[in-house]
Image (spheres, rainbow, N blue to C red):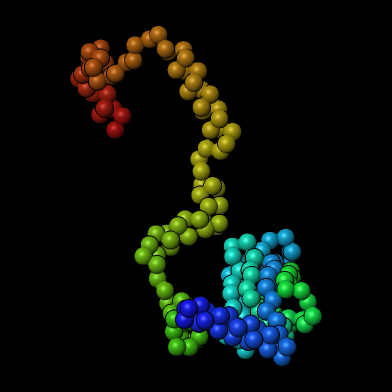
Amino acid sequence: MKLYLLSLYILLSLTISFEAFAQGGSRVIQFSGIVVGEDSTSGVPGVHIYAPKAGRGTTTNPYGYFSMPVLEGDSLIISAVSYTRQYLTIPKGESENYTVIIELSKDTTYLPELEIFPYPTEELFKEAILALELPNQGDLDNLQRNLDEAMLRKMFANTAMGPSANHNYFVQQQMSAWNNRFQPTSIPLLNPFAWSQFIKSIKRGDLKKKK
């Protein structure tokens, strides 16, 4: 019997408190919606919806959807990284459910120009660059000398064989190789007749006559 009276007392207290809240307080509204970007086609995840006065809030899911209980007249802050912060007030006189679509705009921050030098001053940096010597500097200097335009012209002028003569010489070599393709290659040092002629010329004194 005592348990029954206690339960009845708690129920009456809650009813009286609810009626007093309904008469002088604000109604509880289920606030829900979707937060989208500037393209209005994809949801923005991780957006914070916060009521500073009440100290409660929530965040959007991976699809940009959220849902939370609020009171009539609550001022909400909608914020996300790289987006402009927005403010929203829950209107009064609405139904128990309030659904919205919130579109956020990009917040672009332009940072000032920053120059970074590995030396205290720009003058010291320029001097270090001008005094820099590469590991293969000697090879680069030789290459630069060999590619000198005046030197290349001089080498071309002193060439004994021009393009036309070079072509004729190549054709003659090909013809000679074709004509002698079936003949054995002769080596004078291994030819006994050549040695015989050489010895006879020495005995005749041909070398002395030429002197």
Residue at 69% of width from left, 76% of height from top? Answer: 29
Q: Quadrant of residue 165?
A: top right
User: Total marks drawn?
Assistant: 0
Q: Is residue 142 left or right of residue 13?
A: left
- Outermost residue on the bottom side: it is 24
Q: Quadrant of residue 80?
A: bottom right
Residue 27, horizontal then vertical, whole percent: 70, 81
Q: Is residue 76 above or below residue 34?
A: below
Work out whether residue 6 or residue 86 is closer to the camera in this orientation and state it.
6
Residue 201 visible to the viewer: no
Residue at 54% of width from left, 47% of height from top? Answer: 156
Work out whether residue 59 or residue 125 is closer to the camera in this orientation and state it.
59
Work out whether residue 166 or residue 158 is closer to the camera in this orientation and state it.
166
Residue 102, horizontal then vertical, whole percent: 72, 71
Q: Quadrant of residue 31?
A: bottom right
Say which quadrant the C terminus sits in.
top left
Q: Is residue 65 above or below residue 110?
A: above
Q: Is residue 22 left or right of residue 122?
A: right
Q: Is residue 180 above or below residue 57?
A: above
Residue 48, horizontal then vertical, whole percent: 60, 76
Residue at 68% of width from left, 61% of height from top? Answer: 42
- Outermost residue on the front side: it is 1
Residue 46, horizontal then vertical, whole percent: 58, 70
Residue at 55% of width from left, 30% of height from top? Answer: 167
Residue 15 visible to the viewer: yes
- Outermost residue on the right side: it is 93
